[in-house]
Image (cartoon, grey):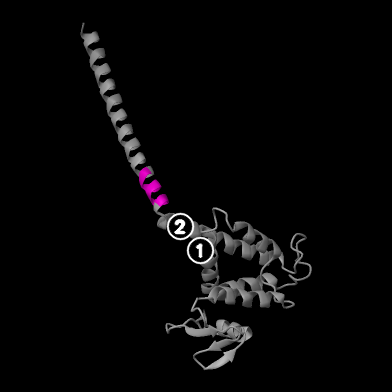
């Protein structure tokens, strides 16, 4: 669980050693990985320049974990697609979406674990495999993942629409246009009624003559 206390300061020295200021001891990347799993927040600074190097250190932890057998979380297709997003017009949106998705997965992990357990039960690792998966994941598990992804995307899109000033302006303009169209429709209806009433009066005058 994340804490409200100030994050622990880790200093990285020129010899690449990491110093934990809270415990006054040197730590390894594996130790920092353990802190992350334990919910302890920390920031890493270059001891000489004072630069915040938390991001590259965390990236290095992920690289080390991905290098271990059986520890792979990031599919090759995902990594390639992620690389393609660098320099793309969508680059600014990707971090927010990934963070949003991971936050939702963390919040709903108990329910999601239950869904995955049900999906993997009943021989999902064997006869339940679909030909297109090929990675030991049953079709039921894939359905659960796809459902979670669709839900995340729908919520994220709606949130982005509400908080995006350009989208909000466009929505307001569309609403104004809709109001104007409604007013025009009302005016047209009034005109039709007046013409109909005038036609009735003319018909009556013609009959009296």
User: What is the distance, in whole Å, between disc 1 and disc 2 at their CAs?
Assistant: 10 Å
Q: Which part of the image, by quadrant, shows the C terminus?
A: top left
Q: Give the range drawn in magenta.
A: 166-173
Specify the quadrant of the image occupied by residue 30: bottom right
Image point 63% across, 76% down: which residue?
60
Could you tell me residue 5's position as x and y percent? Answer: 42, 84
Farthest residue, direction bottom: 24
Query: Which residue was labeled with disc 1?
Result: 96
Question: Mark 1 touching mark 2, by CB under 8 A?
Answer: yes
Find numbered disc 2 in the image and state the secondary structure of the residue it sits on.
Answer: helix
Question: Which image quadrant is residue 66 in?
Answer: bottom right
Residue 69 point in image, percent of width and height: 74, 77
Q: Which of marks 1 and 2 is nearer the N terminus?
A: 1
**Magenta-colored stretch includes residue 169:** yes
* Magenta run includes residue 159: no
Taking depth in this image into account, of 198 and 133 the one nearest to the observer is: 133
Residue in view at x 62 percent, y 65 percent: 145
User: Horizontal and vertical percent for residue 133?
Assistant: 74, 63
Q: Is mark 1 on a helix, strand or loop?
A: helix
From this view, report whether residue 9 is shown above or below residue 110: below
Q: Which mark is residue 18?
A: none
Vertical order, 208 against 18 (above or below): above
Give the residue at x 66% y 64%.
Answer: 79
- Residue that badge 2 annotates: 160
């Amino acid at each position: 669980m994340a804490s409200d206390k100030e994050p622990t300061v880790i200093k990285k020295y020129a010899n690449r050693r990491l110093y934990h200021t809270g415990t006054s001891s040197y730590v390894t990347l594996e130790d920092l990985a353990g802190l992350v799993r334990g919910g302890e927040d920390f920031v890493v600074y270059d001891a000489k320049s004072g630069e915040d190097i938390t991001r590259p250190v965390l990236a290095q932890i992920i690289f080390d974990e991905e290098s271990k057998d059986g520890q792979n979380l990031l599919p090759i297709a995902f990594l390639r697609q992620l690389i393609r997003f660098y320099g793309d017009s969508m680059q600014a949106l990707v971090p927010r979406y990934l963070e949003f998705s991971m936050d939702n997965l963390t919040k709903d992990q108990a329910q999601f674990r239950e869904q995955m357990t049900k999906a993997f039960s009943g021989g999902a690792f064997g006869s339940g495999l679909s030909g297109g998966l090929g990675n030991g994941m049953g079709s039921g598990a894939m359905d659960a993942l796809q459902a979670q992804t669709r839900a995340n995307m729908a919520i994220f899109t709606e949130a982005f629409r509400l908080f995006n000033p350009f989208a909000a302006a466009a929505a307001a303009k569309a609403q104004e246009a809709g109001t104007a169209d409604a007013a025009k429709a009302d005016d047209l209806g009034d005109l039709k009624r007046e013409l109909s009433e005038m036609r009735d009066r003319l018909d009556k005058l013609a009959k009296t003559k």
